[in-house]
Amino acid sequence: MKYLVRDKVLAIGDDYWIEDEDGRQAFLVDGKALRLRDTLELKDPDGRILITLREKFFSLRDAMTLERDDQRLAVIRRKRLSLLRHHHRVTLVEGTELDVSGRIAEREFKIEYAGELLALVSRQWYRIRETYAVDVIREDADAALLIAVAVCVIRMTEREGEDAREVAGEDARSTLGDVARAVVG
């Protein structure tokens, strides 16, 4: 089943609906503003919280946790030693690992378990700007979990890009200041 996500650059406090392929509201992503850490809730159409997505505090590497019924469900981390630039590992609480790889910033990636494709995330099916689909391949797969994983890795990748741009901007300002002092001094 395909789920349509209208991406609002996932800003904190933004709420948006994820629709199924028939245009029905399937999930609500509820951004919780004014929290110390990045928190989102994935809710069903009746408002019940299915999965809570949280930025992991005090982590050496960027990580987000997924919780169901106030219990940790999974931890998502970017793989540091990977030939692929965008590769994340999802470790479920029972030890199962999912691999997420592809062009995450472009919304073109896959979620796999032991080499088996569970979900495909792509913009190729939609021409609407800032819209992508999460195609859950296996009917017995947990669609809410796979959508939560997709939202998390996109959010982590965007934050990583923002951090890199900030560092590059600071480096550029520092270099310009050094040049200005050398010219004036």
Image (spheres, grey):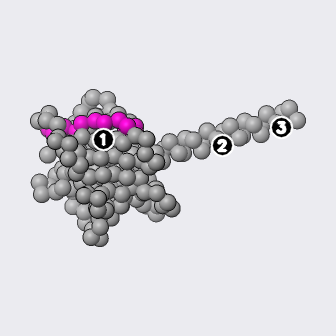
Distance Cα–Cα, label 3 vs label 1 = 51 Å
Checking the image for residue 182, the label placed there is 3
Q: What is the residue that sits farthest to the bottom in this orientation?
A: 95
Quick one: quadrant of the C terminus?
A: top right
Q: What is the residue that sits farthest to the top in this orientation?
A: 128
Residue 14 among those drawn in magenta = yes
Reading the image, the residue beneath label 2 is 171
> At 61% from the left edge and 39% from the top edge, which residue is drawn?
169
> At 24% from the left edge and 36% from the top edge, which residue is drawn?
17
Q: Which of the two residues, 7 or 17, is positioned nearer the viewer here?
A: 17
Q: Which of the two residues, 66 or 36, is positioned nearer the viewer here?
A: 36
What amino acid is found at the position of numbered circle 2 in the picture? Answer: Asp
Q: Is 82 left, or right, of 107 in this rendering?
A: right
What amino acid is found at the position of numbered circle 3 in the picture? Answer: Ala
> At 30% from the left edge and 47% from the top edge, which residue is drawn?
41
Reading the image, the residue beneath label 1 is 30
Q: Position of residue 44 (x, y in %)?
A: 19, 44
Q: Please, what secondary structure does the residue beneath circle 3 have? A: helix
Q: Quadrant of residue 77?
A: bottom left
Q: Is residue 98 visible?
A: no
Q: Residues within 10 Å of mark 2 (few under 14, many from 20)?
A: few
Q: Quadrant of residue 70?
A: bottom left
Comparing marks 3 and 1, which lies closer to the viewer? Answer: 1
Q: Is residue 41 visible?
A: yes
Q: Residues within 10 Å of mark 1 (few under 14, many from 20)?
A: many
